[in-house]
Amino acid sequence: MVLAFVLWVLGIASVVYFGVYAFIIGLNNSFTYFWLLLGVVLSAAGTASRMCHNGRLHLPKAVSVALLVCVILFLGVFGVAESAIIKNAVQKPEKNADYIVVLGARVNGTRVTLNLKYRLDVALDYLNENEGTKVVVSGGQGKGEKITEAKAMSDYLVKNGIKSDRIILEDRSKNTNENLKFSAELIGSKEKKTVIVSNDFHIYRAKCIAKKMGYTDVSGASAKTKPITIPNSFVREAFAVIKYKIFNQI
């Protein structure tokens, strides 16, 4: 009965989170529906657990063992991925880098969004503390964006006191792989001391992609994430890391 109660509570919490996220943020990515599906699955598992406890449902021992093994394996793999993400999210960047690369994110018209602002504020702090460092702002122009993400980021940095001759615009990329590939082309070398700036949940995968590409001296500077998006971002990122590992992309 305790297991059934726990599963029901977790299922309800998952559905509630889906509703709150959809109301505040919107259904801006398909992964958001994961929380609704998870809620349904956990609630169904809670009901099945209670039925087994009451003798109304009988599962063959082999099926029960197989389900338990699958759950343990999944939680183990997921836990390893999430641990790596969290560990890198709290690590400090190396000082006096040759370059920092700020990975792009969605722009509303010409204005940076909150998560992108968080990245840029981290970049500002780093640039002010390390005056010899230059910055590559990396991001092309997507749907609903009136200018490139790189231009919006550059404007923000200049407005906040960074001289334009320290800023390099990479305005072609559409994803993290292209961010890092095209930035390296502009830098002219993958051996320069480089700090990647992104939101905390994204640092681990971004660093792994960079190393896979041949960056030899790379660290991460993590920016915070909008609070309501933290569960969604960190869980989604764990699945992304697992996928990238399976397909040897990192």
Image (cartoon, grey):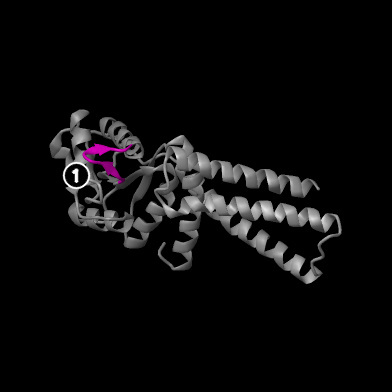
Q: Is residue 164 above or below residue 34?
A: above
Q: Is residue 229 visible?
A: no
For the point 43% across and 36% down, the residue is: 226
Provide the residue designation for mark 1. Answer: 146
Q: Is residue 87 above or below residue 48?
A: above
Q: Is residue 221 left or right of residue 167?
A: right
Task: Say which quarter of the image contains residue 78.
Answer: bottom right
Q: Residue 135: where, in percent of width, then height? A: 23, 42
Task: Say which quarter of the image contains residue 117.
Answer: top left
Q: Is residue 41 left or right of residue 48?
A: left
Which of 7/51 is in front? 51
For the point 52% across and 45% down, the residue is: 18
Circle 1: residue type: Lys
Which of 10/193 is in front? 10
Dot 1 crowding, Cα within 10 Å, few <14, some 14–19, many 20+:
some
Whether residue 27 is in magenta: the answer is: no
Q: Is residue 173 above or below residue 165?
A: below
Q: Residue 60: where, in percent of width, then height? A: 80, 70
For the point 29% across and 36% down, the residue is: 120
Q: Which residues are magenta?
A: 105-113
